[in-house]
Each structure stands twice: as C-alpha cells, then as structure tokens.
Image: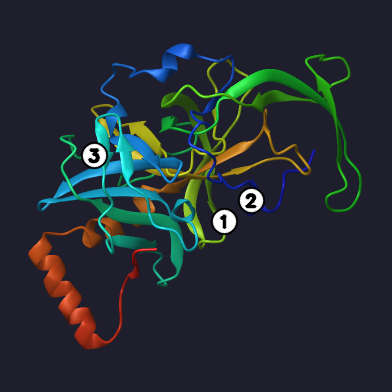
Amino acid sequence: MRRSVAIAVAALLVLAPAARALVINGGLAGNASNSGSGLPWNNVGSVNGASGVYLGSYGGSYWALTASHVVGSGSSLGNLVLNSGTFNFVPGSGVIVLNGDNSTTDLTLFRISTDPGLSSLTLSTTAPGSASLITYVAKGSVEGSVNYWSVTVNAGPNNDVWIDLGNNPTGNNAAGYLVAGSVGERWGQATVTSSSSYNVGTGLTAAFYTTFQNASGATQGAGGDSGGATFYYNGSGWELAGIMGAIAGFENQPGSAAVIGNLTFSASIANYNGFITSAIPEPSAYAALAGLLALAGAACRRRLGPR
C-alpha cells in the first residue's frame, strides 16, 4: 500500500468534544488515568473540542500552547479546559509560532486569565531521536472494534481499493481499528521513527513522527488529538518534546479508521524553543519589545486577535 501523499487530508481535525483519547493497540483502560510516573498529566486539557497544553507561569502570565489549526478560521480561540477547571482565553493574546523565515507554523501560543496552580513544563531543547520512547497525552478519538481490510493497489493516484472485512481476518492485508467512543484524557506510548515536517494548511512545521505498530500498547493519533502533548522522559524528568499535529494514512484509507502503519506527527518543540521562550518573557520586557517593533514598523511574530 502507498502512504497518502497529502498529509493535510489526514490532519487531526477538530471533532466534537465527545470523541476523545488516542488509539491504543489492544486497548488499555488504565491509560485513562494518571500513570503515577510524574507525567504532567494535569497540564493537558481541551481547546475548541481538540487538545491543548498548559506551559506554565512566566512573569505572572499563564501560557498555553495548541496546534494552530485547532484555532479555526473565523472563530475564537476557546478556553482551556483542564482537570482542575476551565481557564479563560485572554483575547488578543494568541501568538502564532514562526519559522526562521517568518513563515507560519502549526503552533499557537495563548494566555489564560488565571493560575491553574500547576508546575511549569520543561521545554525540550533537543528533539527525541529515532527509537526514543515518547508518551502522548491527549483528548482525541479512541479505538473501537478491531477491523480488517483487503486492499488492492492500482496504478495511478487515489486508485487503491479498500474492501471492509469487518472482524474477519481472512484475506486481509491491512488491520487496525475503527475509531469511536470516549474515555476522556488518555496517555499512550510510541517510539520515534524519524524527523520530518508537515503542513495542514497553517504552514510548514518541523516535526518528528511515530509509526503505529502491531504491538500491544502501541499508540496512534486520531481526530481531536491535535494540540495534545508529546512528552519525553530524559532520564531525570519529563520534557514537552512536541505538540500533536497531523496523521498520515494510506491511499484511500477509510477516514474513520486507524490502521497499522499509520503515522503520527508532532511539531518539534526543540525546533521552536527559541521563539517560544522569547514570546513569553516578563511582561515589562514584552511591552518594551512590542514598542520597538511598532517603531520599526514590522512585527517579528504574527498575532491572533479575538475571532
């Protein structure tokens, strides 16, 4: 089978809030509660029906991060809903993270109005390498029933044919899960395959990705996981290594399925660490910077106002 070329088509699109919580091979009900390993479970919540991450307090301001496509066109960047409550988005505080050439990415910073009382996250300065174990925490779709398909690969684009075999594995050459249900917040693990980039219409974004494996506990992103956290344990503590942003399926793969071999992309925090940390300085420094930019007549970051 050929992997879908247009990752944008397989973006982790915003779904209704009822559809939540990662696709995990074998189904692990215990992953719907804190692992007890110090994982920053409570820093992950929901935004606009998808996911978002509370970064911490910087100079008395409270910052969060999500995927830019979660914000949506012509809509307000919604409040951040954490386990401890709902925290209001500060209008006009959105900052789209930029590449070095000032082009936009699929990452958006924003402020919330009150303190959630959570510790600030450590932001990765080095992306996890191939074979590194990462942990996803998000509120997207969950696996439903096991499903099989017979796939015929035909020449030309978008000509592959998928025949749904249901739960009968006879004659299958593709297997996975139908996507359904809700269990709330969930964590799952995967190993990094490699680094890459993706573009879901919000700009080219440096990323790393994992591959959905045929092994118990292997995890795949799904609808609603956009903006969720990708954590890496560095041997002494947890780092926020990425923000979940896109998935890639096979050509003509059914949209409501997670199939072994699918990919999950996370925007790499290490690649944008400098921008993020400069965008959330002390309030006085931020005001001074804004004044200098106004005098120069050019902005070094693109802002989102209320929508």
Where residue 168 sits: x, y (%)?
82, 14
* Disc 1: which residue: 200
Q: CA distance from mark 1 to mark 3?
A: 26 Å
In the image, 41 versus 90, the foreground residue is: 90
The numbered disc on residue 295 is none
Where residue 253 sits: x, y (%)?
75, 38
Where residue 58 sits: x, y (%)?
15, 51
Residues packed near mark 1 inside 10 Å, few (<14), some (14 to 19) or many (20 plus): many
Which badge, 3 or 2, is on the more N-terminal residue?
2
In the image: residue 277, left or right of residue 50: left
Q: Is residue 184 visible?
A: yes
User: Which quadrant of the structure image shows residue 301?
Assistant: bottom left
For the point 37% across and 50% down, the residue is: 78
User: Which quadrant of the structure image shows residue 80?
Assistant: top left
The numbered disc on residue 7 is 2
Q: Are marks 2 and 1 in contact (CB under 8 Å)?
A: yes
Q: Considering only vertical position in the picture, is 9 above or below 182?
A: below
**Helix, strand or loop at mark 2:** helix
In the image: residue 20, left or right of residue 92: right
Q: Are marks 3 and 2 in contact (CB under 8 Å)?
A: no
Which badge, 1 or 3, is on the more N-terminal residue?
3
**Helix, strand or loop at mark 3:** loop
Identity, as a three-letter code, of the amino acid under mark 3: Leu
In the image, 118 versus 231, the foreground residue is: 118
User: Which quadrant of the structure image shows residue 132?
Assistant: top left
In the image: residue 63, left or right of residue 306: left
